[in-house]
Image: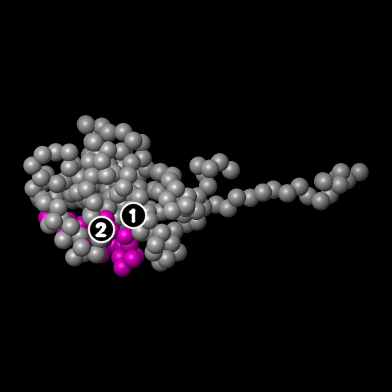
Amino acid sequence: MSAASSYDYLFKILMIGDAGVGKSSLLLRFTDETFDEHIQSTIGVDFKVKHTTISDKRVKLTVWDTAGQERFRTLTSSYYRGAQAVLLTYDVGRRDTFENLEVWLKEVDSYSPNKEAIVKLLVGNKIDLPDATVDDEEAEEWAKSNGMMFLKASAKDDEGVKECFEEVVRKILETPELLKSSAPGRPRIKLQPKAQEEAGGCC
C-alpha cells in the first residue's frame, strides 16, 4: 500500500462565506499550490483532497468549497453532515462579507450535527489588497465572542493559507469527540503465505 493511500484520520472541512471572498482560491492554493486570477465562482459544491502530516498523524483532508450564492444554500445544507471543521471566510476589503458572517454562523448552528464541538476558524482573506474595511481587532473580537479562532490569509500571495488549514487540523486532533466521527485510515495488511504452501503444497 502506498503512503498516499494510507492515513490515520480522514477529516472533512467546509469552506463557507459570501460569493467572491476567495474560498475557491484558498482551496486551490492549499491543495494545488496555484492561483488563478480569473477563477470562476463555484456552482453548488466542489471539493479537493489533500494528504498531510500534522502532529505525527497522517491526515487525509477532503475540503469542500460551497457556493456563496443564496440560491445554492439548500443544496449545501446536507454537506455539513460529517464535517469536523468550517472555515468562515470574508474579504477584508468588503465589509458586507464580514457582516454577513452572522448568517453563515447561524447556518452552521442549524445544520451541523457536531455544532458544539465542530472547529470554527474565521479567515480574513485578500490581505494583499489595500484599503481593508474590517480591522483586525474587530474581526478578532467577533471570532472570540463566537468561540472560534481568527487568522488572515492571501491566496494570491500564498500568505497564511497553509497555516489556516494546519491550525484547524491541530484543533480537530485535540478534540476527542471529533476524532470519534472521523473515518480511520485503512490498516496496513501483510499477507502471510498459508502453512501448507510454505511446506510445498499438496501432491
**Depth check, front residue: 23 or 147:** 147
- The spot of residue 147 in percent (x, y) is 24, 64
Q: In terms of depth relative to the viewer, which is nearer, 44 or 178?
A: 178
Extreme right residue here? 203
Of the numbered discs in the image, which one, if any, rests on residue 168? 1
Any part of residue 184 in sight: yes
Q: Quadrant of the N terminus?
A: top right
Q: Name the secondary structure under disc 2.
A: strand
**Helix, strand or loop at disc 1?**
helix
User: In the picture provided, is 17 more to the left or to the right than 130?
Assistant: right
Instruction: Specify which label sits upstream in the sequence, 1 or 2.
Output: 2
In the rendered structure, the answer to whether residue 30 lies left or right of residue 134 reads right
Look at the image and name its color scheme. one colour
Q: Position of residue 137 (x, y in %)?
A: 13, 56
Q: Residues within 10 Å of mark 2 (few under 14, many from 20)?
A: many
* Residue numbers of the magenta segment: 99-121
* Residue at mark 2: 149
Q: Is residue 181 visible?
A: no
Figure quadrant of residue 29: top left
35 vs 93, left or right, is right
- x 47%, y 52%: residue: 56
Give the x, y percent position of residue 190: 67, 49
- The residue lying at 24 percent from left, 51 percent from top is 151
Q: Position of residue 71 (x, y in %)?
A: 20, 49
Q: How many marks?
A: 2
Numbered mark located on residue 151 in the image: none
Asked if the residue at tag 2 contacts the one at tag 1, i.e. Cβ–Cβ closer than 8 Å, the answer is yes
Which quadrant is home to the C terminus? top right
**The residue under label 1 is which amino acid type?**
Val
